[in-house]
Amino acid sequence: SAVISQKPSRDICQRGTSLTIQCQVDSQVTMMFWYRQQPGQSLTLIATANQGSEATYESGFVIDKFPISRPNLTFSTLTVSNMSPEDSSIYLCSAEKTVTDTQYFGPGTRLTVL
Amino acid sequence: GESVGLHLPTLSVQEGDNSIINCAYSNSASDYFIWYKQESGKGPQFIIDIRSNMDKRQGQRVTVLLNKTVKHLSLQIAATQPGDSAVYFCAENWRAAAGNKLTFGGGTRVLVKP
């Protein structure tokens, strides 16, 4: 398994601002992912963070709103840009060591936009 | 407490009884299935997985059953304990050209009564 940490654990932000969430894995992993979990809902995949290339976004999510970086095999960031109250959610990072491995999740970042 | 599980179906179980959580999946090409447990304020935690070439897998106090004919997955928890109170998600994995895709079910909240 992989131990995954996220920073910040929670934040309260004003609309129109941006927040960058960091995800750190304790060992090298092949794949990293970002999910959104809206209040009382299940998890929805935002994008796959690719090391050395642009992230792959799912339908309904765009790079301008959710820019993602993955500079190496243990670290990724997700930025929530120009936030509105509708962006209030839990944002979760996950990772898998190999393509046949299970995805393990970080503790999440709880974002509230006022 | 956190907002996870507020709007999800709830299974109330007496402590010591067995719990059965059901999940329907959608993609017949999915080759790998995972059950996650999410406690309040935490990220999803891996419980047990099963590959599509199996129909049953047992872990410690948990059993997963897979019925590919009707695309149905279930999680059985034996002798349910207060610590089992959480939201449980099934997830199906299929391999797209860009890599693994994990799709989560809606989730079930399990409430263990003492």
Image (cartoon, rainbow, N blue to C red):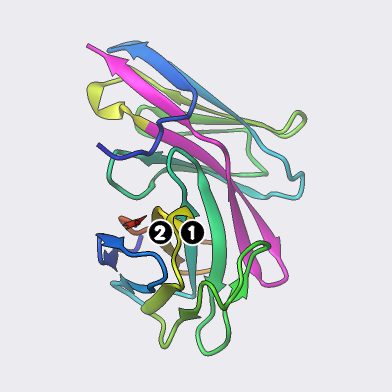
Residue B99 is at least partly visible in this image: yes
Q: Are marks 1 and 2 in contact (CB under 8 Å)?
A: yes
Quadrant hosting residue A55: bottom right
User: Which residue position holds label 2?
Assistant: A92
Rendering coords of residue B17 (x, y %): 35, 11
| Magenta highlight on residue B104 | yes
The amino acid type, in three-letter code, at marker 2 is Leu
Compared to B92, does A85 lie above or below?
below
Q: Report helix, strand or loop for mark 2.
A: strand
Left or right, residue B17 beside residue A84:
left
Q: Which residues are magenta?
A: B87-114
User: Which residue position holds label 1?
Assistant: A35
Compared to B5, does A13 lie above or below?
below
Q: Nearer the viewer, residue B7 or A44?
A: B7
The amino acid type, in three-letter code, at marker 1 is Tyr
| Magenta highlight on residue A36 | no
